[in-house]
Image (cartoon, rainbow, N blue to C red):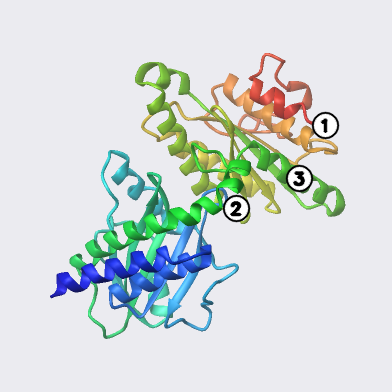
Amino acid sequence: MADDKRLADVVALAQGMAAAHTPRESWRAAALGACRALDGSFAALSVWERELGRLRVLVNVGERAPDELEFPEDEAYPVHQFAEITEFLHEQWAAGGQPNAWVETAEGPAEGLRPGYCHQRVAALRRRGRGCCVVAPVVLHGRAWGELYVARPVGAPVFDRADADFATVLAAVAAAGLTQTERLEEARRLAFTDALTGLANRRCVDMRLDEAVERYRADGTVVSLVVCDVNGLKQVNDTYGHAVGDRLLERFGSVLSLCGAMLPGALVARLGGDEFCLLAVGPPADDVVKVADELCRRAAELELGEGVACGVASTEEPIGPVGSARRLFRLADAAQYRAKAERSTRPVVAGREGPDDPVVRLADTPSEEATPERRRFRGRG
């Protein structure tokens, strides 16, 4: 009988999503279907916004707390607080496996979660009077898209391994339904998203950097740009093939998203080839440099490649007038070029002096032998 009920629940979830005509209807159908199938009291569906480094809640259903809106506009959590979605879950399916759901209780992780994480979910369960939850990764196109979350109240039976396995199935069914919602966003992704990594693309950075510099000129808001190259990509491509090189770029993109989440509102992007960037508007330059340093450290620990060459330029540093996006980019690019030439394992910061912070001036800008990607970006007025 239990198997029959679960089969009926799967069918009901699929039918509910097939009947949805808008993204919101699709999200709500996924969360409601999973909540009913798992006998939960609350459910939520969240998306991993890689370019902003955060998990954004799309919908909350069931018995909501006072601060939980059905369709929240701004309920989001830095992805580094829930690092399992960017770290070990990625590794679990990178070799061809499938990510599994896991269970947590108000007393701590129940099963399936590698030790050592800061359990923000446990604190949330206690704060909202819930006893346990099951979290199932949602995977679209072979990449982590987000997660399905179902909770039960204090006193209700705790989810077990069978429930977690069923949640994994429900997340897969939800992913199939969400594919039609994804098609509605295809035009936007093509315009502003890098297809390989899921990060923002050069066009998006171009637009946002222009806006940021205009804001800086109007009210002095700090604008910082980090430009970095993945070292050793050509050797990886030549030795293991371009498919493995692409995986290195994807993995570095995930690391960049994770680090970018440490800066509120930061935009992370792939400019093209092995070149990436991070744009931060508002945070102090020192905070941006610390994140760039962490990025260098994490990149050096990747299994493939040879780390990253990283340059930073910020309007808070003594770099002279910044009248255009082009000039800030040229300074960050020059700093990155210096880091690469010197094989620096730490970011080089434009305008700073000292053995650990070599000064980089506009005159240090690389020659026209720089990559075509850089020449095209610097060529904008």
- State the residue at coordinates (67%, 53%): 283
Q: Most extreme residue toward the bottom, as rendered?
A: 155
Q: Most extreme residue toward the top, as rendered?
A: 369
Distance CA(mark 1)–CA(mark 2): 28 Å
- State the residue at coordinates (54%, 77%): 69
| Residue type for callout 1 | Gly
Label 3 vs 1, first from the N-terminus: 3
Q: For mark 2, what is the residue?
A: 263
Asked if residue 265 lies left or right of residue 132, the reply is right
Q: Quadrant of the C terminus?
A: top right
Would you identify the image quadrant in which residue 203 lies? top right
Asked if residue 360 shows in the view, the reply is: no
- State the residue at coordinates (64%, 25%): 373
Q: For mark 3, what is the residue?
A: 316
**Residue 123 image offset from top left, x and y in percent:** 40, 73
Give the vertical position of 125 relative to 164 (above or below).
Answer: below
